[in-house]
C-alpha cells in the first residue's frame, strides 16, 4: 500500500500541474490581449467611432504575436503566472480541505445540505486564495499586455515600479470584480464538480470499470466544472483585466486605445456593455474555454491525489 502511495506522488507527478500550466500559458496571453482590445464604440445605437482591431480572433492573435514579437512572447508573464498558480493552489486546497472537515460535522450538516456546503466551501476558499495571491495576477496581466517596448522587465522591477508609481493600491486594481467573480466561480466549480462526480460514480455502480476509477471521475468532473464555471462569470473576468491595466502607464501597452474607466468595477462593466455591446463582455472567451476544461481537469486530478495522500497519512 505504501509503495502505491509513493508511486502516485513521484516528483514527476507532483510537477504535473506546474508543467501543464506552462504549456497552456500562451492561451492566457492571447486571452488577455483579446480582452483588452476595444474594437467598436457605440453611442445611442450609432457607431460613433470605429477602432481598428489588432487581433481578429484566437488563431490570428497567436500568429500575429509570434510574428511581431517572437514565439517566446507567447509566454510573457509566465513567471508571475507560475508564482500565482503555485501559491493560489496551495492556499485554495488547504482552505477547502479544512472547510470540508468543518462542514462535515453533524451540526453543520443540519444547517445546510451537502451540495450547499460544496458551494459555500468552494466560494470561501476561492475568495481567500484570490485576495492572497492577487498581486501576481495583476503582474501576469501587465506583462502579457506588453509589446516589444517593455515598461516592466522583471518581476522584481515591476513590483518596484508599480509601488513607486501607484502605491500599494496599484497591486489591487480590479480586486473587487475578482472577489465578486470568484465567489460564484468557485462555488459553481466545486458544486458542479461534486454533483458530476457523484453522477459518474453512479454510472460505475451500474457497471463499467472506467467509471470506478477515481482519477477518471476527478478528471471528467473537473473538466465539466471548469467549462461551466468559467462561462458563467466571464464578463467579470473581462472587467478585471480592463481594470488591472488602468493607471499612469496605460498608454505603454501593445493594445492601443485601451479605454479608461472610473474607479469602480460597475462603471467599467456598464461602459463596456454600452460601448461595445454584450459581445464585448465575452471577448477572449474561446481561449478561456479551451484552457478551462483541461486545466480544471488537471487541477482536480491533482487535488484528488493530494486528498488520497492526506487520508493515507491520517490513517
Image (cartoon, rainbow, N blue to C red):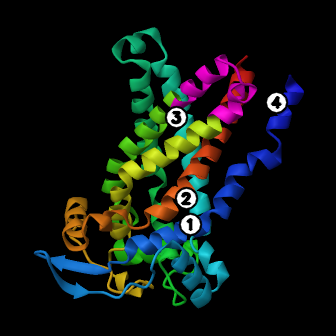
Is 7 above or below relative to 64? above
Q: Is residue 200 magenta?
A: yes
Estimate the spatial distance between the alpha carbons at disc 1 and disc 4, rounded to whole Å: 33 Å
Q: Are marks 1 and 2 in contact (CB under 8 Å)?
A: yes
Q: Residues within 10 Å of mark 2 (few under 14, many from 20)?
A: few
Indicate the secondary structure of the residue bearing disc 2: helix
Q: Where does label 4 land, which residue? A: 5
- Which tag is nearer the camera, tag 4 or tag 3? 3
Q: What residue is drawn where x is 25% and y is 60%?
A: 265
Do the residues bearing badges 4 and 3 touch, measured as CB atoms within 8 Å? no
Which residue occupies the extreme right position in the image?
3
Q: Would you say residue 195 sits in the magenta stretch?
A: no
Where does label 3 land, which residue?
193
| Mark closest to the chain's N terminus, 1 or 2 | 1
* Residue 31 percent across, percent down from the top left: 48, 68
Stretch of the chain drawn in magenta: 196-217
C-alpha gap between disc 2 and disc 4: 32 Å
Amino acid at each position: 500500500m505504501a509503495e502505491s502511495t509513493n508511486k502516485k506522488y513521484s516528483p514527476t507527478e507532483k510537477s504535473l500541474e506546474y508543467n501543464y500550466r506552462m504549456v497552456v500559458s500562451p492561451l492566457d496571453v492571447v486571452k488577455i490581449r483579446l480582452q483588452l482590445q476595444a474594437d467598436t464604440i457605440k453611442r445611442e445605437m450609432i457607431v460613433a467611432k470605429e477602432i481598428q482591431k489588432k487581433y481578429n480572433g484566437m488563431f490570428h492573435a497567436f500568429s500575429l504575436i509570434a510574428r511581431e514579437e517572437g514565439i517566446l512572447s507567447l509566454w510573457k508573464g509566465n513567471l508571475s503566472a507560475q508564482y500565482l498558480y503555485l501559491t493560489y493552489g496551495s492556499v485554495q486546497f488547504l482552505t477547502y480541505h479544512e472547510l470540508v472537515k468543518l462542514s462535515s460535522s453533524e451540526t453543520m450538516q443540519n444547517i445546510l445540505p451537502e451540495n450547499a456546503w460544496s458551494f459555500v466551501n468552494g466560494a470561501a476558499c476561492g475568495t481567500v486564495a484570490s485576495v492572497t495571491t492577487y498581486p501576481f495576477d495583476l503582474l501576469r496581466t501587465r506583462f502579457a499586455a506588453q509589446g516589444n517596448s517593455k515598461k516592466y522587465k522583471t518581476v522584481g522591477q515591476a513590483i518596484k515600479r508599480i509601488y513607486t508609481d501607484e502605491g500599494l493600491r496599484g497591486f489591487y486594481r480590479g480586486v473587487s470584480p475578482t472577489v465578486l467573480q470568484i465567489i460564484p466561480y468557485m462555488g459553481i466549480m466545486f458544486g458542479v464538480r461534486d454533483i458530476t462526480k457523484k453522477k459518474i460514480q453512479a454510472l460505475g455502480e451500474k457497471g463499467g470499470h472506467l467509471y470506478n476509477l477515481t482519477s477518471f471521475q476527478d478528471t471528467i468532473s473537473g473538466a465539466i466544472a471548469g467549462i461551466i464555471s468559467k462561462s458563467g462569470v466571464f464578463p467579470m473576468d473581462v472587467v478585471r483585466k480592463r481594470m488591472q491595466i488602468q493607471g499612469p502607464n496605460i498608454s505603454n501597452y501593445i493594445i492601443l486605445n485601451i479605454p479608461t474607466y472610473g474607479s469602480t468595477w460597475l462603471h467599467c462593466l456598464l461602459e463596456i456593455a454600452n460601448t461595445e455591446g454584450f459581445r464585448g463582455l465575452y471577448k477572449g472567451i474561446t481561449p478561456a474555454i479551451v484552457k478551462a476544461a483541461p486545466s480544471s481537469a488537471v487541477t482536480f486530478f491533482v487535488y484528488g491525489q493530494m486528498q488520497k495522500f492526506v487520508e493515507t497519512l491520517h490513517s
